[in-house]
Every structure is written in structure tokens, then in C-alpha cells.
Image (cartoon, rainbow, N blue to C red):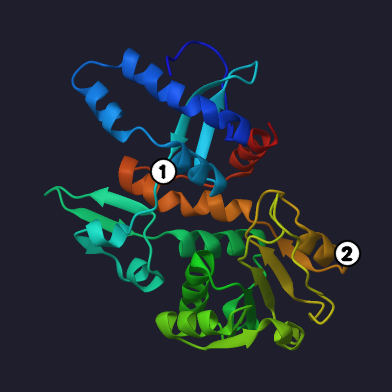
Amino acid sequence: MVCRRESYRVRPASRGDLHLIPALERAATKRYGGAGIAKVYDSLCMTAEQIEGRQHRGRLWVAVDRDERPVGFATWSVLDGLAHLDEIDPIAERIGAVNTILVAADGTLEGSNSDGFGFLENLRQAAPQWRAELGPVVLLGAGGSARAAAAALVDAGVPALRLVNRTIARAEQLAQDIGGPIEPYAWAQCGAALKDSALLVNSTTQGMKGQPALEIDVQPLPPTAIVYDIVYVPLETPLLAAARARGLATVDGLGMLLHQARPGFAAWFGVEPQVTPELRSFILADLAS
């Protein structure tokens, strides 16, 4: 894409965009064909099947101009980052993923994971009344976000972490990997898990824009419970709306996104950023556009 002083918008690619991806690759080859780059583009051009597969998995985004014409695209592949790093901090190793890589003075690559930090900092900022010792926590889901949240909650000292997942074997594996007072529950046992819980956390994608709603009854929760949904699009998910209707305290997922970026920013630029109302408003305006 040739950069000009124009406004561009980035969005997920639609099926109608797919036929334009090869043309954009060829245009980039023509524009930036010097220094051997053309050869690289020629060897890495995606097939039609690869383009369609990446779009289907949500790994293909396009930049569009004011007339909604694609002018550039971005795609990526998921790699086993842990296999390419020289050092991995204990938290990242325990979670099984890294989201921050720092190049040390000697050139070695150091990996860390700040998702758990972001999860906990958001909870403490949005619900300062929460303390780990207040009671059991119910965590929905057993994916990557759940692993980070579980590690953070266990390390914070929660007395019990009730891990509810549709596939009980996956919950059991997470409990074994993370350690601590994690109790796997089948999805059908969710109501029982909620009783006397101080905190409910949704770490699944259910309730996210474009995904099915999270079908869960918050009635068994005590009136002092806090409900935390890591989804931030929409900002108020059906789960949070149901919790508010019951008068429960709620925490949305936007703060987790912002707080988890703090350690990486500080490591790369030497400045500790703060999550302020102004920053939150700026991101919300960007999401709305």
C-alpha cells in the first residue's frame, strides 16, 4: 500500500475481498520491487485456498479507503513462540504462551506473558472492593485466556477456583498445568458452582459480537458477587447486562486489554504507562468508529 494523507479503516476481510488479495500482493511487488523484495513476494504469494482459509479463521484483515476499496491487507500465522525463545519467564511457561518478547543486550530473546497481570489489574481498578480472600471464584472456559486468569487468581490467593467448562477433560488438564486450588466442574454444574461465589469470570468468546450469547443464569450468585466478562466488543455483554439488572457489580474486558499492554510498553520504551479514563475514552471512540 502506498501511504498518502488519506483516512483508511482496517476491518476483517469479507469473502467479497478475497479476489483482490493477489492483486494487492502484485501491486506491492511492483511498488517495492527493489532489494530483492520482489523475489520474496513471488515466493510467498498465497493460494486461493490459503486466502479463503485465513479469512475463515479471522486471520485476514484489509485496509479500505473512504469508498470501501481495499488498498492493503494483513495476515498472520500462529507459531509456537516458546520454541523460538532463549528465556521464558515462569509465568509464561506455566500459562503456555507468550505475548511479549524482549531482545536482551546480548541478542537473546526473552519471552513473558502479561495477560494475567492485565486481568488482575483491571479487576482491582474496576472493582477495588474485591479481595482474593472474599470467597471462591467461578471461571468459565478453559482456553488461553482462562489459563492466564487462573494463574493470576491462584497466585493472588483465592481459596477456591471453580473451573467450569463444556469439556471436563480440558478443565482437568488446565488445573493440572496451573496448580493450586482449582476444582473442575462440568457445564451442567454451573449453577451449583455459583452459589456462595465472590466472583464470576467469563473467559470464553460467548457474548462477543458475532458469537453466540452466553446462556447462564446469574440468579444463584450472592448479592455481593462481582461479575467480570473479558469480552469488550460489545462493552456490555448480555452477561454483564443480566448482572447489572440484579444489582451486581460488574467489570468489562476493555481494561484487561489496556493493562496487559503496560509491561510490554515499559520494557520496550522505558516508560510505565497508566490506564486512565482519558485512555479508555480514546479506545472506546476508536472501537465505535
Q: Nearer the viewer, residue 102 or 7?
A: 7
Regarding mark 2 in the picture, which secondary structure is present there? helix
Picture coordinates of residue 85 (x, y %)? 23, 58
Q: 24 left or right of 137?
A: left
Q: Which residue is mark 2?
A: 245
Which residue is painted at 44% across and 26% down in the image?
22
| Among the two numbered marks 2 and 1 on one chain, the one whose residue lies closer to the N terminus | 1
Question: Label 2 crowding class (10 Å Cα cut-off): few <14, some 14-19, many 20+?
Answer: few
Quadrant in which residue 214 is drawn:
bottom right
Which residue is painted at 52% across and 75% down in the image?
153
Mark 1: which amino acid? Trp
Picture coordinates of residue 201 (x, y %)? 65, 70
Q: Nearer the viewer, residue 255 or 277?
A: 255
Regarding mark 1 in the picture, which secondary structure is present there? loop
Which residue is painted at 53% across and 28% down in the image?
19
Q: Which residue is mark 1?
A: 76
Which residue is painted at 43% across and 85% down in the image?
176
Please, which residue is most extreme toward the right here? 245
Q: CA distance from mark 2 to mark 1?
A: 40 Å
Q: Nearer the viewer, residue 256 or 206?
A: 206
Q: 22 left or right of 246?
A: left
Question: Label 1 crowding class (10 Å Cα cut-off): few <14, some 14-19, many 20+?
Answer: few
Picture coordinates of residue 27 (x, y %)? 40, 17
- Tally of marks: 2
